[in-house]
Amino acid sequence: MFCSWQINLYFCIHFNLSRQKHLKMAKEITSREENYSQWYLDIVKKAQLADNSAVRGCMVIKPYGYAIWEKMRDQLDKMFKETGHVNAYFPLFVPKSLFEAEEKNAEGFAKECAIVTHYRLKADPDNPGKLMVDPEAKLEEELVVRPTSEAIIWNTYRDWIHSYRDLPILINQWANVVRWEMRTRPFLRTAEFLWQEGHTAHATKMEAIEEARLIHDVYARFAEEWMAMPVIKGVKTENERFAGADDTYTIEAMMQDGKALQAGTSHFLGQNFAKAFEVKYLTEQNVEEYVWASSWGVSTRLIGGLIMTHSDDDGLVLPPQLAPIQVVIVPIPKPEPELMLVADAIADKLKEKGISVKIDTDDKNRPGFKFAEYEMKGIPVRIGMGKRDLENNQVEVARRDTKEKTSAPLEGIETYVEKLLADIQANLLQRAKTFRAGHTTIANSYDELKEALDGKGGFVYAHWDGTTETELKVKEETKATIRCLPLDGEQEEGKCIITGKPSKQRVIFARAY
């Protein structure tokens, strides 16, 4: 006969071996060091975020991936409305003549446009069962499938705006757009993606600039407080700014491979679109003036940023603020009635604190398989409990970010978990900041810039002479672009690392997605 400690040892060894087996079977993730690009694709697939579709370059966002987007959307929508914005919706199709009205905008997006030329199919007489475009159903004017909505919106604003009393207009829309990309990657760059786009109209230049800066701040706050993704706030160069804008404000994040990700942009459009569409208003002095404008947007690209900022070789890592499920409770070894009663009680207490919870009711798979699955999906906190735990009035709590496990008393477990979730959120932000600091370099020569880019990568601060010619030379020779002129950058006299011409501020060079 075996004594109790031998039996416990047997089950412990058997459980760990089983878990290792299931981890290996469930994961099959390429490591970041081996192939970062494949690692990213593996996580998108294994964490059940998205699938490829029958349309080249498009993706199917699966329920778990869409749940993350909903969390982002709902929080951003709340922040927009708190700053006085309202939602509306504008057509998917833009008449080609309207799209051409603002020349810089049209030229900037021309290569990515999908065009509708006909409105009907008919049976193909030469191929039974097949359809063909009906040549008699050709549109009088071709329609652009919106790559962005400035054209259709400003054509509409012309009918809405007549006097200073009609201003400002502060509108946002949640929509899809199409940009026919040649090289695609789920969430980061797809032919169709989801986003929000704000389009505002103002009586004065300063009001429009303040609007662009306001949303710039909103984006930065969302990235850091909800995504736990630190960003650099800055202004784009003339070459990199939005087509049709006078200024583009950007937030730039660093991914774990050292590449930059443009995570959100806010544009001061000046009077460019107002002049293109003849949008004028009467001032209080009864003088006719062109309207001033801004536009701004973030997209499902943020999910790609979330993956690449925090995740590891075991799968997705999610900040609690954006996790669809913040806590999973796993009865061990199976969801027996005695364990389920306690699980339900814990879940109720957590829900009272606004914490989202899932109770695992799977009675087919082993705990090791379940743990691997929840690690893969990045659920921030896992609570495991067996009969022995309940006898000791405690549960096992595991945190996804550090993989640390500890025993916690049942009494007050909801307060313990609430604090743990806050700790995880803060830790992920600090960890990302530490990584960014370790991959930021000051370069005082072109050789130092190239050495940093080819070495640890990341952000390289260097002086630049302000010319597009120099900027394009660096891009051609190093594949690095100027991500931004950082708004918090110190004003310092220096010389361009390429031409030796005077410079008053360092800019950020990086390779980027």
Image: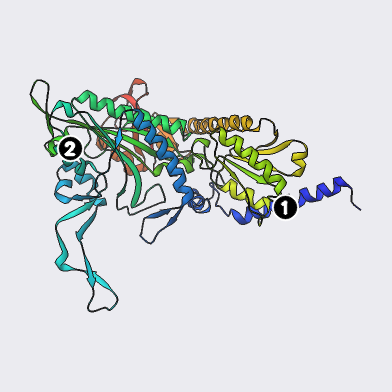
Which of the two discs, 2 and 1, labels the residue nearer the N terminus?
Answer: 1
Q: Position of residue 358 (x, y in %)?
A: 58, 44
Front position in the image: 286 or 503: 286
Residue at 15% over, 46% down? 98
Q: Which residue is mark 2?
A: 157
Whole-angstrom CA distance, mark 2 to mark 1, is: 65 Å
Q: Marks 2 and 1: CB-CB under 8 Å?
A: no
As drawn, the label of residue 227 is none
Front position in the image: 100 or 233: 100
Left or right, 327 with respect to 248, comes to right
Q: Position of residue 322 (x, y in %)?
A: 48, 38
Left or right, 457 with respect to 446, comes to right
Residue at 56% over, 36% down? 351
Compared to 137, does 402 lie above or below?
above
Q: Residues within 10 Å of mark 2 (few under 14, many from 20)?
A: many
- Secondary element at tag 1: helix
Q: Amino acid at mark 1?
A: Leu
As drawn, the label of residue 17 is 1
Q: Position of residue 433 (x, y in %)?
A: 49, 30
Q: Quadrant of residue 346?
A: top right
Q: Quadrant of residue 89?
A: top left
Asked whether the viewer can see residue 279, the reply is yes
- Secondary element at tag 2: helix
Q: Amino acid at mark 2?
A: Tyr
Asked whether the viewer can see residue 462, the reply is no
Q: Position of residue 35 (x, y in %)?
A: 51, 50
Left or right, 459 with respect to 361, comes to left
> Where's the C terminus, which quadrant?
top left
